[in-house]
Amino acid sequence: MNLLQAIVLAIVQGVSEFLPISSSGHLILVPHFLGWPDQGLAFDVAVHVGTLLAVLIYFRRTIVALARAWIDSIVKRIPTREARLAWQLLVATVPVGLAGLLFDDYIEQHLRRPEFVAGTLALFGLLMYAVDRLARSGRDEYSLSWAQVGLIGVAQALALMPGTSRSGITITAGRLTGLTRSAAARFSFLLAVPGIAAAGGYEGLKLATGAVPVDWPPILVGMVCSALAGIVCIHVMIRFIERIGLLPFTVYRLLVALVILLVAV
């Protein structure tokens, strides 16, 4: 992999991780259309670490407050809304962790196909738009019940399927529970911290125990570029989602699905 390929794929990951358009699907499709070889596990781990850094940097004050409240809830038994949200983010990560352990090999071997990505892009894009249009909203992320958190957690597990979009399916589930668009996006992005950390740790362990050599320059460039792209994307999404809604992302997903069916299948 050369540095240009690393930069392009890192930006694709940084943007598509936080827009509801599927990062895994785009990391499969972009090399496919450009005729590039598979970027490899090491690069995938690096750009996911980059998007994790983007969330940690952008939400640093919120994350520090949640972490302190979570520790206080254990040590001092002090219940606060921040502590409750921190626990809910951890609980919502459990389903995707279990699903990853059970189905990761099957997904890698059978679902990373362009036609499958096209189907999930279209199906979950239409579902996202329907829920966004029909759901009542007006609540923030601190108002979620434990059952609603469980629903979002199960929804996140579905994002293991390429083309689904982790942010898209969790924002959809958040909207279904009555969260505003911006609140659903914030919860989705905060949920990325334990989710991406767990996935990155798992993939990193596979990398560390494997015998594949690591080409460090594109790895480091990919990590930095995905972090920068992620920060910009989070800022734009949070700022404008209440105004633009989710329809543009549904239209984009449908167009990409159509292109896949016409060209790649």
Image: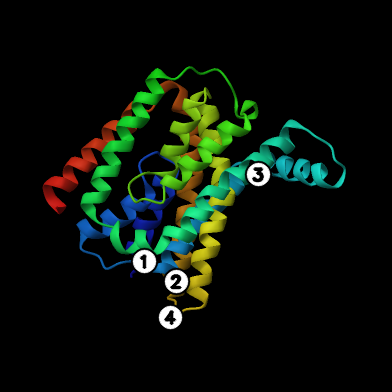
Q: How far, Cα to Cα, is label 3 from label 4?
A: 34 Å
Is 201 situated above or below 152?
below
Q: What SS does tag 2 mark? A: helix
**CB under 8 Å between callouts 4 and 2?**
no
Residue 160, position in %: x, y? Answer: 41, 51
Q: What SS does tag 4 mark? A: loop
| First along the sequence among labels 4 and 1 | 1
Circle 2 Cα neighbour tier, 10 Å, few/some/many (<14 / 14–19 / ≥20)? few
Residue position marked by numbered label 3 in the rendering: 60
Query: Which kind of residue does numbered mark 1 sit on?
Result: Leu
* Residue 58 placement: quadrant: top right
Circle 4 Cα neighbour tier, 10 Å, few/some/many (<14 / 14–19 / ≥20)? few
Query: Which kind of residue does numbered mark 3 sit on?
Result: Arg
**CB under 8 Å between callouts 2 and 1?**
yes
Is 263 situated above or below 238?
below
Residue position marked by numbered label 4 in the rendering: 213
Q: How far, Cα to Cα, is label 3 from label 1?
A: 29 Å
Residue position marked by numbered label 1 in the rendering: 3
Closer to viewer: mark 4 or mark 2:
4
Q: How far, Cα to Cα, is label 4 from label 2?
A: 13 Å
Closer to viewer: mark 3 or mark 4:
4
**CB under 8 Å between callouts 3 and 1?**
no
Who's the residue at 47% across and 57% down the image?
A: 100
Who's the residue at 33% across and 37% down the image?
A: 124
Query: Which kind of residue does numbered mark 4 sit on?
Result: Pro
**CB under 8 Å between callouts 3 and 4?**
no
